[in-house]
Structures are given as C-alpha cells and as structure tokens.
Image (cartoon, rainbow, N blue to C red):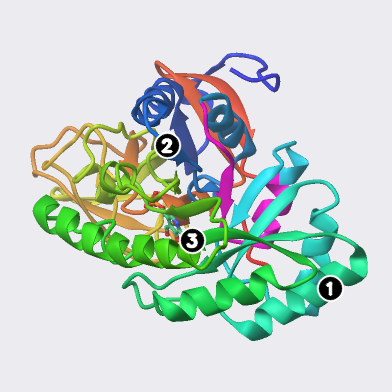
Amino acid sequence: MTEQSSVLTPFAAVDTPALLLDASALKANLERMAAFFARRHCKLRPHFKSHKCTAIAKLQMQAGAVGITCAKLGEAEVVADAGIRNILIANQIVGPLKIRRLVELCRRADPMVAVDSAENVRMLSEHASAAGVKIGVLVEVDVGMGRCGVVPGQPALDLARLVAASAGLRFEGLQGYEGHCVDLRDETERVAQTRESLKALVQSRRLIEQAGLRVNRVSGGGTGTYTITGDCDGVDEVQAGSYAAMDWWYGDIRPEFKQAMSILTIVISRPRPNLVVIDVGRKGVGAEWGPPRVKNLPGSAVASFGSEEHTMLSIPPDSAIRIGDRLEIIPSHGCTTSNLYAEFIVHENGVVTDKWPIEGRGKLQ
Ligand SMILES: Cc1ncc(COP(=O)(O)O)c(C=O)c1O
C-alpha cells in the first residue's frame, strides 16, 4: 500500500506480541469518515495521537483532511518530517525550550498552537518576533471538559484581542474540545451535552467576530461526536482520531467503524481447564477503559489483566484453545496502545503486506 511495501510475509511468521493493522478495515474507516465530511462545510483534521503513524496521516490527507491535529510538539515535528505542513498542536506550548523548537518548526511547516493565558501569548510572541516568524494561534475555550481553556465569552474575546495585537502571532480562531461528551455511552445524552458545549463555543466565536476580529477556524470534536460537531453551524473542523484504527470502547458506540487495530498474542499457559494466559499485559495494551477483548471469540473468552506481561482469559472448560495458539485481542483504548509499539504490522486476509513505523511513539515532549 505504500512505497515501503516489500515482501509478502505469511501472517503466521509474525512474532508476538505485535500490533496489527487490518488494511481493508483502515481503508473502510478512512473512506467512511471522508464521505461524511465531503459534503459539509466542516472538514476533518484527524488527530495524529491516535495512531502516531505518518503513513496513516498521509492517507488521511489524501482522503481530504485539511490538516493534522497533534497533541505534542514532538508529534508535530514527526508529521512535518513526513511533508505535511498544515498542523494544529491542540495544546499549550510553554517554556523557552519548546517555544524555540516551535519557532524552528515554523520554518518548514505551518503549525498552529492553542493558548489559554496572556503569559503564554507573550512568551510565544516574543520568541516568534525575535526569529521573524508568525505563529498561528487558536484561543482555547473550556467548553465543559474542565481541562485547559479560558471561560467562554468575554475572557475568550479578551485573549483573542491580545493574540491579534501580538507582533509574532496570527489569530486564527478557537479550539474547543468537548472531551467530556465524546464517549458518553447514551447517544441521546451525548447529542444533548455536545450541543450544549458547542453553544458556548459558537457564542464565543460570534462575540469575537462582532468585535471585528476574523475567525478563520473553530476546531474541536472527536470520534464519538463527529456527527454532532461536524453538523454544528460555526464549527469548521473536527479533530477525530480514533475512528481510523479504533478500539472496543469506541466500537460499542460507533459501530460504523471497523476494528482495524489488534494485538497478536500467543497462549503461553493453560494452568486450569477454564483459564489461559497470553503473552501481553499492561505494558503492551492500552488499558484505561478496561482489559482487551478477544477478537473472534466474543463472550467465550473473557479477559482480565494479570500483570505487566500477562493477560488472563477465562474460557469454557471444554474450549479447544491450546498452548501455542495465536489470538488477536482488541484494546479498550487504541491511542495509548499505538504509543507502545514501534510499528504496525499491516495485513490483508491474514497476509502481512507492509510494516509502518509508528514515528510518534513516545513523543511526549
Ligand atoms: C484535543 C483533542 N481533540 C480531539 C480528540 C479526539 O480524539 P478521538 O477521536 O479519540 O475522540 C482528543 C482526544 O483525546 C483531543 O484531546
């Protein structure tokens, strides 16, 4: 599928644990999301943190994304290295060490960053002016998540004015991520809470526009809310990321996307008839939303974490699973799982077709 494509390797030759990526499921997910945004004003700016793999980011751009979202400066550098210029770091970049790197990044890409304080605005502007570059800035509004962001309304306008008046900065618009809504299990509640959050964001936009500032983009949203945020008048970009590779936590509320990511494991022990142990644990599976699920064995093998390198599967005592059997498991959280592996083993119909480096792995700085 990419220029890195090499020999066809039998799937069975892949050692465990390994992070697998089903190429047809990925393709279906990218096409489905692209089709949703194709006919809308709002566009997709996929979040890199979910897969951290530039081969996937490039496919997302080819499918019509306006740019890429990153959580960290180090991720943005990796994305820029892959030739993608339009990057939003949906986070605060603070302190001279990082701001110097951001200024350097401006020489080979067009990064934007989020701000929520006057101190940060001043720091960014001083460094950018001294280096003769302009940094694009989104004022982050807290739309109810209680993470970063200024209070909607007047505080957002005040900070937007400061950004617009800062020599080294370019006021681009607003960042508002409804993280407290994206994975609400009940759809009616998800729709209601998301709309409520977006109201505050869009009202802030209108206030800023009425004050005479141009708002180029309002960016937010995730996989759980893309249909709501993507249809909201006044929002220009959705930052969904999980939809590409998925996980079971999102799979339960967004069944329109396929499980492209899985972990190949091997059964290392069957100490009792109703228990097998596989060779991956908390160090190899993103675990925030619970233990993984076993692919293709729904209900008949229930996983619970044992320890760092072990996961236990409760099985029926008459199960045919044997030591040495290879099983695929689906993590509860794909974003933290991709961060644990050096590469995706890309496969189609049980045959390995490619290996894609996860260049953003461990890019915490
Ligand atoms: C700023 C921001 N935007 C968007 C997302 C959406 O990602 P997902 O597709 O996993 O919901 C996240 C997830 O944490 C985020 O932090």
Q: Quadrant of the N terminus?
A: top right
The answer to whether residue 150 is visible is: no
| Disc 3 from disc 1: Cα separation | 28 Å
Q: Answer with left or right where residue 158 lies relative to residue 331.
A: right
Residue in the picture at 35% in, 65% down? 203
Q: Earlier in the sequence, mark 3 or mark 1?
A: 1
Q: For mark 1, what is the residue?
A: 127
Q: Which residue is found at the position 42% from the left and 36% from the top?
A: 244
* Amino acid type, mark 2: Ala
Label 3 vs label 1, nearer the camera: 3
**Residue where numbered disc 3 is placed:** 209
Q: Earlier in the sequence, mark 2 or mark 1?
A: 1
Q: Which mark is residue 244?
A: 2
Q: Residue 306 at x, y = what percent?
A: 31, 64
Of callouts 2 and 3, the N-terminal one: 3
Q: Is residue 68 above or below residue 131?
A: above
Q: x, y (%) of residue 248?
A: 27, 46
Tell whether position 67 is magenta.
yes
Q: Which mark is residue 354?
A: none
275 or 93, nearer to the observer? 93
The local crowd at label 1, few if under 14, some if 14 to 19, many if 20 or more residues have their Cα within 10 Å, is: many
Q: CA distance from mark 2 to mark 3?
A: 34 Å
| Element marked by disc 2 | loop
**How many numbered discs, if any?**
3
Ligand 1 placement by image quarter: bottom left
* Of the pair 289 and 291, the residue shown nearer to us: 289
The magenta span reads: 64-79
Q: Nearer the viewer, residue 329 or 242?
A: 242
Query: Is the residue marked by circle 3 packed among few (<14), some (14-19), or many (20+) residues within 10 Å?
Result: some
Q: Amino acid at mark 3?
A: Glu
Q: Position of residue 272 (x, y in %)?
A: 18, 53
